[in-house]
Image (spheres, helix red, strand yellow):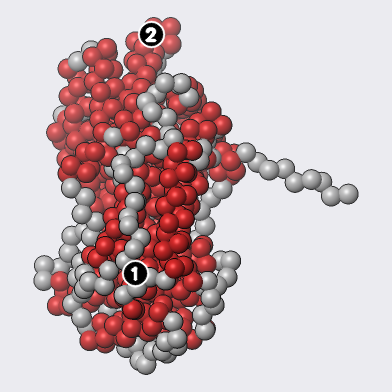
Amino acid sequence: MPLPSVALPPWLAHALRSQRGPVPWSAVVRGALAAGPLLLAAVVAGQPSVGVVAALGAMLAGINDRPGSRRAAVRRIGVPGLAGAGGLLVGSYAGEHVGAVTLTLFLTVLGLVAGGMSAVGPVASGAGTQLLVACAIGAGMPLPEPGWQRALFYLAGAGWLIALRLALPTTAVTAGDYRFDGERDAVGAVYDAIAELLIAAGGTDATARRVALTAALDHAQDALAGPRLRRYASSGAERRLHAQYAAALPLAEAATALAWVGDSVPARAAEGPRRLATAVRTGAHTGPLPAPSRSAPALRALDDALLHAADAFDGGGTGRNLHTRRRTALSLARTAFGAGGREYGLRVALCFGASAGVAQALHHAQWYGNHSHWYWLPATAVFLVKPDLGPLASRVLCRAAGTVLGAIVFAGLAALLPRPAGLVAVVAVCGALIPVATRHFAAQTAVVTVLVLALVMVAGEPPAAWSRIGETLLACAIVLLVGHLPALGQRGGTVRARLARAVEAADAYLTHVLNEGTTDDKAGRWALRREAYRALAEARAAIDLAAAELPALARHAEGTDEVAATLERLVDTTTACAVQLDDNGRLTPRHTERIAELLHELAEGRARAGLRVKQGPEVPIAV
């Protein structure tokens, strides 16, 4: 008799889940050439402490070295690196000139600011993390160099990895200037996702394919953002990529409208986007693109979009920067100090401050013995409190398991390897493993633990493998306690803030489509559509994360997933309306009735979820 299957609780299932995909060999090579060589050069020069600081900068930069374009990597690695250097500078002087109580209060306030800033987005989150971690290290790690030199060496380590990211080719190079391989791959993936959505139209997999298309567009949007790699746009190469991305927007709109209709699409309709994807990656001409039937508005829109894309590809159109997200300083401030930012900022401040206070108390307690690595406790708490890394219970479990494994592995290596050459080799190997280990928080923790313990010994501090375990477990207990306090800001604030932004973006998109009708401002419409889908994806990610928390936390986000699902259907319907209005200037009763139903369903869902947002989509249906 077969045993009944047992469903794991969401937080445990998340802890056992890891990302999959091909090994990022290019990132592995960069990791091997980053922290290890910097440390080796400093050891040979007789300045090991300088190498330790530079290797720390390179290590934390390596955690942010994710797949994508070079231009995006400059911001994704550079901004947190600058924040980390600032944190190291401030922490070094604070640790030298203020007492334990004042230092704890200072770190608590800094945690509040950095936590609120982290709610803005992934780059801001990385910057907030490095700011706090480097500040704790600067305040507690005994190094001979003054604070300003530490900051410069730290920044040099991060800058060295950025230089490797810009200079070295990747294994994905297929054509043209290798510096644009990330952009080409990202834009090509958009056309592949469009083809998959066309194939799935009329089937049960259509919704999942539309979500995958949104993710591909988001990734391409990020890949094309950031500083230009050449001053004059490489005599057309960058402009061509922008034009190819812009040409994908009407194709994505038509494919979404076809999926909304619910009828299957002939297989030949997907051949055109497939050929366009190949042309993006290889630089070859598209050749004749198979024309779909023009028997319906969405099919006519698809045919027109293919013709426009063929012209943009073969004619080398200039394109326009339709992908740019224009978020003003006021908008960023509203996010940082809004409900989500306040909730996260309070949690980070309490965890960081409490960990620093406990560490200071242990550091000055005569009965505790040597506690020279007190800065590990608040630095560990910073990583543990980050919601980017998964549900609270899941990341605590992974952090504890990874630290124990890493400490045991390092204890064995330290007993066998010569010093300092063996420790430098360990740092180089760990740097190469980080890009692979980032797929699972426990694996990343184990690799980073080995690397940090090696750096500590190179810097001349006593071995600390076993104290590392004890302080990690103490940090886990502090974060679990603070994370479940009953009155820590507005519970579910991050979810509600992102869902409110998604409602506002859907409102703007729906209003534009129904009120503007068949105007020529398609570029504005596509930009609003992109913002609506992107905001929805961010809200959905926050909701899924909240649902995987322990019940005491997950209950605060109940009902928000239904609101997000309704919003997704509303934005899909709005896209179908846009295509219909382009075709003949009138909406069918099916379109108007569906919008009315979804607006009513959205209002009811928001009421059930207790969601308070600015005025939602309430637009006159008669067009």
Left or right of 56 on screen, residue 203:
right
Q: Position of residue 503 (x, y in %)?
A: 35, 48
Task: List the single residue furthest toward the front.
Answer: 622
Tag 1 residue: 578
Please name the amino acid that badge 2 sits on. Ala
Q: Is residue 28 left or right of residue 1?
A: left
Q: Depth-wise, is mark 2 or mark 1 nearer the camera?
A: 1
**Left or right, 444 with reference to 140:** right
For the C terminus, which image quadrant? bottom left
Crowd around label 2: few <14 · some 14–19 · many ≥20 (10 Å): few
In the picture shown, does residue 378 fall above or below 196?
above
The quadrant in which residue 525 appears is: bottom left
Q: Which element type, helix, strand or loop, lies under badge 2?
A: loop
* Front in this rendered view, residue 153 or 66: 66
Give whichever of 212, 259 is nearer the camera: 259
Q: Is residue 592 visible?
A: yes
Residue furthest to the right in view is 1
